[in-house]
Image (tube, helix red, strand yellow):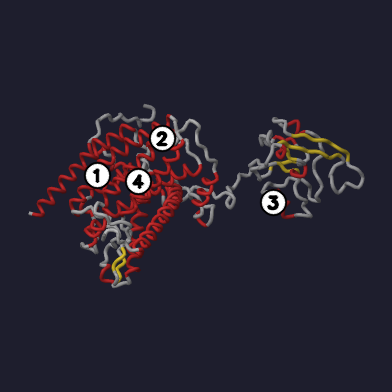
């Protein structure tokens, strides 16, 4: 059987890659919490945390250590199994989404190429979507198992919000898929590399500006970020679905949220901002060592992700939360028609160009 | 119409572009990003301190004269003046040989101020005929228990001006010495 003849090297390569990506996700999530507080401070004419280590860079470690040593409380009236399952599920789903993202240019050697991507499956982007929709259960199960009315309201809000915003997100994505003709993430990135100005002009954000905006807004809603943070609305719902959680289970929920942010920024960067493409230069003509090339393209992707994360944070500290009816109106009555329009226009233009 | 600034409330339904909020959100983001480059309002407390006005009333200090003798004669006027009844004292007579410690023939053996009762009004300072008590520029007392907030003579007395000149001047602050 040819399918089962997987070499040990292949497994080792993937295992290393997975370990690196999980480590990276945790590291970035940690420092996103720091960036969040720092940027919040700057935007409010403050300094932000600056006591733990130089410029406060040890702050996330202090926060994490604090969470570890907090008392673990499981409410008596809760459903214990589900109560434990909730944060675990939230964490797993947010980590799994990063499997299909190409993190850098493949390292081409004479024995074959090593892709910096855990799985380059044919249905690439659909995996992200299916896993994200499972992510709703993390919130729902946590909110339900807490046996608390605020948590339950938050869980219902979260579920309906995420389900409604997946629709325009998917529709905005379809327009992109029209242009690439493939669901494979590597093909989507490849489609954006060969264009004017070193690939810059072929980034999908220029051909799909409306799709980009819709996708970005929906990503905010999927990550439960302000202005769509209704599931955890502090002042209405007492922190919503993680109200009854303490210690590292709370930490898992909060952490999963930041990992979600990181992964959705990576997805946006891959779909619309050219993935690991370096703009304005023709990197193929450099003739660099393959590993160096991969490293540079990886840092380019990280730069794009950092910029998107900054925008996420920037938005959070600018606008207040939407009311629930405004949220639903925006999702169903504004974004879905716009996304449909975008899809139809794209399809028409594609047909016209083909003729 | 007191201010002439009253505006008619606009109740027109939002247009489609307004209802996706995008333009207004971008405007708001412009405002917040401009704050990124503004001067920070923070005073980094333990390193930097706000400058006080001349009449700032902080923790109390029991004063000494230039030779290091205690000014207080335990007359009790400060305790009488105190609206919060925070001051307690006990008087004693100066014995021969103690002239270098106390300026007058009578002095306070016990002098306590309950900092939890004190309202830092400065009436004790005004009542004192001997310029023995005044409110310094140190503040923010911290302690582990309520008992620690009852300041005894050891905590209140100013350092000796001849033996520990630096600490004396620091405790004196920038208040003009009247004697």
Q: Disc 2: which chain?
A: A
Chain that bears disc 3: B
Q: Secondary structure at mark 4?
A: helix
Q: Are marks 3 and 1 in contact (CB under 8 Å)?
A: no
Q: Is residue A151 left or right of residue A343?
A: right
Residue A248 position in % (x across, y down): 49, 44
Q: Which residue is mark 3?
A: B170
Nearer the camera: disc 4 or disc 2? 2
Q: Chain of mark 4?
A: B
Residue under the point 16% across and 48% down? A346
In the rendered image, which residue does mark 1 sit on? Answer: A170
Task: Using the numbered discs, state the Cα–Cα distance from disc 2 to disc 3 in whole angstroms.
Answer: 58 Å
Give the residue at x 69% y 36%: B146
- Which residue is the site of mark 2? A143
Does dot 3 land on a helix, a strand or a loop? Answer: helix
Quarter of the image with the N terminus of chain B is top left
Q: Vertically, is B55 above or below B3?
A: below
Does any portion of residue A310 appear in the rendered image?
no
């Amino acid at each position: 059987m040819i399918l089962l003849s997987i070499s040990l090297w292949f497994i080792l390569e993937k295992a290393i890659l997975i370990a690196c990506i999980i480590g990276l996700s945790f590291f970035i999530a940690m420092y996103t919490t720091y960036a969040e507080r720092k940027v919040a401070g700057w935007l409010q004419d403050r300094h932000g945390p600056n006591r733990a280590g130089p410029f406060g860079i040890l702050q996330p470690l202090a926060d994490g250590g604090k969470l570890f040593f907090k008392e673990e409380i499981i409410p008596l009236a809760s459903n214990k199994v589900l109560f434990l399952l909730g944060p675990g599920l939230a964490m797993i789903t947010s980590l799994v989404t990063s499997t299909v993202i190409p993190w850098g240019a493949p390292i081409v050697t004479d024995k074959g190429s090593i892709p910096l991507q855990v799985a380059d499956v044919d249905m690439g982007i659909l995996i992200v979507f299916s896993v994200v929709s499972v992510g709703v259960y993390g919130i729902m199960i946590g909110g339900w198992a807490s046996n608390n009315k605020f948590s339950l309201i938050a869980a219902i809000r979260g579920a309906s919000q995420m389900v409604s915003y997946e629709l325009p997100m998917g529709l905005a994505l379809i327009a992109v898929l029209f242009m690439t003709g493939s669901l494979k993430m590597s093909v989507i990135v490849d489609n954006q590399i060969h264009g004017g100005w070193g690939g810059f002009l072929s980034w999908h954000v220029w051909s799909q500006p409306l799709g980009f905006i819709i996708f970005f807004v929906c990503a905010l809603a999927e990550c439960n970020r302000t202005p769509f943070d209704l599931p955890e609305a502090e002042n209405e719902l007492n922190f919503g679905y993680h109200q009854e959680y303490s210690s590292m289970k709370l930490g898992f929920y909060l952490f999963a949220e930041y990992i979600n942010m990181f992964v959705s920024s990576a997805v946006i960067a891959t779909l619309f901002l050219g993935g690991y493409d370096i703009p304005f230069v023709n990197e193929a003509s450099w003739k660099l060592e393959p590993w160096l090339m991969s490293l540079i393209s990886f840092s380019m992707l990280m730069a794009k992700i950092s910029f998107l994360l900054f925008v996420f944070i920037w938005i959070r500290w600018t606008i207040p939360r939407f009311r629930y009816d405004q949220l639903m109106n925006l999702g169903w009555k504004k974004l879905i028609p716009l996304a449909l329009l975008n899809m139809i226009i794209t399809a028409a233009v594609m047909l016209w160009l083909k003729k | 119409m007191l201010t002439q600034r009253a505006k008619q409330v606009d109740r027109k339904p939002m247009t489609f572009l307004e209802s996706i909020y995008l333009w207004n959100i971008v405007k708001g983001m412009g405002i917040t990003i401009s704050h990124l480059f503004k001067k920070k309002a923070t005073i980094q407390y333990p390193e930097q301190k706000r400058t006080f006005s001349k009449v700032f009333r902080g923790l109390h200090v029991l004063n000494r004269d230039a030779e290091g003798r205690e000014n207080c004669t335990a007359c009790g006027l400060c305790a009488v003046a105190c609206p919060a009844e925070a001051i307690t004292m006990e008087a004693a007579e100066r014995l021969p040989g103690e002239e270098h410690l106390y300026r007058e023939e009578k002095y306070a053996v016990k002098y306590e101020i309950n900092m939890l009762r004190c309202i830092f009004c400065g009436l004790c300072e005004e009542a004192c005929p001997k310029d023995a008590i005044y409110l310094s520029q140190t503040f923010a007392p911290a302690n582990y228990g309520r008992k620690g907030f009852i300041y005894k003579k050891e905590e209140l007395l100013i350092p000796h001006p001849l033996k520990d000149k630096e600490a004396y001047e620091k405790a004196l602050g920038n208040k003009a010495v009247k004697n």
